[in-house]
Image (cartoon, coloured by chain):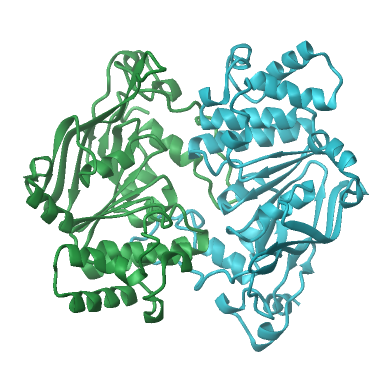
Amino acid sequence: MQTLLEIKNLKTVFSTARGVIKAVDGVSLILNTGETLGIVGESGCGKTMLALSMMRLIPANGRIAGGEVLFSGQNLLSLSEDEMREKRGRDIAMIFQEPMTSLNPVLRIGEQIAEAIRLHQHVPAKEALFLSERLLAEVGIPEPERRVEDYPHQLSGGMRQRVMIAMAMSCRPRLLLADEPTTALDVTIQSQILNLISDLKEKNNMAVILITHDLGIVAEAAEKVAVMYAGKVVEMSEVKKLFSQPQHPYTRGLIESRPSGCADTGANGEAYLKTIPGTVPSLYDLPPGCRFFERCVLAEDECRVREPELLEIENGHFVSCFVSQRIVK
Amino acid sequence: MASVLVDIQKLGKKYVLGGGFLQNRSRIVRAVNGVDLQIFEGETLGLVGESGCGKSTLARLLMRLEEPDAGRAYFKDQNIFAFSYDDLKTYRRHVQMIFQDPYSSLNPRKSAISIIQEPLNIHQIAGRKQNREISAQLMTRVGLSHEQAKRYPHEFSGGQRQRIGIARALALQPALVIADEPVSALDASIQAQILNLLKDLKKDFGLTYLFISHDLNVIRYVSDRIAVMYLGCIVELADKNNLYQTPLHPYTRMLLAAMPSCNPQKKKREMMIQGEAGEIGDQGCNFRNRCVYKIDICNRLIPQLRPYRERGLCACHRTGEI
C-alpha cells in the first residue's frame, strides 16, 4: 500500500492569557491510500487541533511550532498560503461536527456546492449546478433536483451533514478529514452517515481520518486507530488489535468503562462499571513524567519522572507506556 | 410487586410553532402524544429515544415545569396537575431533577456548597448552620472534598459539576429523581464514574429514577425497565433484558442495530436503518415510513400500546409476527 499522509513530530502551540499550551505535542502518524484512521480521545486531547493543523486552519492565537505534514511526499507546512488553498478542498476536504454552522444560511444548497466546485474546476455555473445535483443524489438525498433550491434551515441535521459531505466530495479529494461528523446526530442517522462515508471511501479510493470521542464509531468504521491523551498519541494500532489487545492503560480504561457495549453480554444489574479515576491533567500544568501517571493503575516510579515514547512493540502496534513496552518485550 | 409511585395517563402536550407576524401558517407539534406510563417505587425506568421524541418534555411535565394539554399524572395517587401552590412546593421536595448540561444548570455566582444548600434553605429543612452541615456531608457523599466547598462552578470540571448537581438534587431526600441525559455532556472516562455514583446513591437513599438518555448503552447499564419513545409516543416498554435480547418493535430493533458496538469483528445489520423521524400524522403508524415490516393496516390505523405475552408492551400491528 502507498503512503498518502505522513505526519512527523507535529507540534501546535497556543498562547493564551494563562500561558502557552501544547495542544498537539509531537504527533506522528502514517496513513495509506484508501485507509480509514480513527483518532479517538476525550475533549481537549488535541484531536481537533491535530486535524486543523494538517489543514493549516488553526485559530489565530495558535501556531505550528514544528514537525512535518507530508501529503504524497510534499510538506504542507512549507507551502505558501496560495498553494495551500489549492490543496484544501481539492486534495484534502474536511467535514465538521455541526453542519448547521458550517453551511451558509442565506445561500441555497445547490449554490454552495457549486461554489466549491467552481473554486477548483473551471466549469460554467450551469454545469456546476448540475454537478451539485448529481452529488446530492450520490450522498443519498432524495429528490436532488428540488433540494438544490433549499436553504440549510429547511433540511434536517442528517441531511445537512449529507450536504457537507457532498461538498467535500465535489473535487474527489484523496483525503477526507471528518471531525466528529455524527456527534450532533441521532444514532439511526449516525449509522447512515457512517455507512455513507465508508461507501464513498470505497468508491473513490479515498483515505479518511475520522475524529471521534466514541470508541464504538472507531470499531465500526476505522481500520487503524490512534488514541490521543493530553496532546499526544498514546497508542496506535490496527483496529481489531486495539480492541482485542489494548496495551496502554488509558486505552484499556476507555474500553472497559464503556457501559455494556463492549462486552456485548447482558449487563448484570449489580456490576459496576470500571472507571478511570481522576481527570485529565490541565495542559497548563502538565506533570513532568507520563501524562497519565496520576490516573494509572500500573504506574511505577519511573513514570513519574520520565515521559514514555511511542514505540512499536510489535508489527504496527505502537504504545507509549513503559510498563506495557517491557511486558511485551 | 412494588407500589406505583408515578402513574401517567394519556398525557399530552402540544406546542404551536410559527403563526407569528411573518409566518401565516402555524404548525402544531405534538411533543408528547398520549403517553401512559407507570413508574414503580425503587426501580430505574429508562426512557430512550432520539432527539425530538418528547422525552425531555415528558420530564418537564412531570416536574410541572410545563402544563399538559391532555391527560393526568399521579404521584402517590395525587394528581400533580391539580396541586395548589403549597402542594406543589411539597411535591418538589419529593421529585428532583438532574440536568444534562452541568455548565448551564449551576448558578455561576454561587459557591458549590451554597448551590447544594439552597434547596435546604428554601424548604427550611433545618437552621442555616445545620443545613450547611448537611450540604457538607452531601458533598463528601458525591465525591467532592471539603476544600472544594467554597469554589465556584467554573473552577470545577464537567464531571465534578455534575456531582454538585447530583448533590443538590439529593439534598431534600426526594423519592423520585428525574435524570435528563445526566452523562451525555461528559467524556467517556467520566461517564462511568457518574453512572456508578448514581447507582450507589440509589441504594443508599432508596431512590426511584426516571433516567432519560439517547444512549442505549447507558440506558442498558442503569435501567430495570425501559420505555422506548418515538415521536411523542411510547412504542415499547419492557424489562431490560427482554428489550435488548428480543426487541419487539421495529423501531427498537433499528435503534439497537444502529448502536455502535465495540466489537470490530461484528458485522453490521445495516439493512433496516433508513429514513428520518418525520412529523406526527393523523392516521396510521408514525413509524411506517421507516419501517421495513410495513403492511397495509399501518397506513390506516394507529397502533395502540398493548401487552404481548409476558414480554412487555408494544405498539405495533405486527407484534409477535415479525
Q: Residue at x 57, y 78 (%)?
A: A294
Residue most extreme to the bottom? A301
- Please give left or right for residue A102 compared with residue B254 in the image: right
Q: Is residue B206 at least partly visible in the picture?
A: no
Chain coloured cyan in the rendered structure: A
Task: Tell me the quarter of the picture where residue A42 sits.
Answer: bottom right
Relative to B68, A84 lies left or right: right
The correct choice, above or below, for B112 with respect to B222 in the image is below
Q: Is residue A181 visible?
A: yes
Q: Position of residue A178 (x, y in %)?
A: 67, 43
Q: At which x and y percent is residue B274?
A: 51, 27
Rendered image quadrant of residue B41 = bottom left
Q: How many marks?
A: 0
Q: Quadrant of the C terminus of chain B?
A: top left
Q: Residue at x 61, y 78 (%)?
A: A293
Residue nearest the viewer, comparing B285 with A282: A282
Determine the residue positioned at 65% across, 88% down.
A301
Residue B236 location in percent, x, y?
A: 30, 37
Toward the viewer: B91 or B198?
B91
* Image: B318 above or below A81: above
| Residue shown at the point (73%, 21%) measured from the top left | A114
Which of the pair B73/B82 is nearer the observer? B82
Q: Look at the image and give the colour of chain B.
A: green
Percent x, y for residue A117? Answer: 78, 24
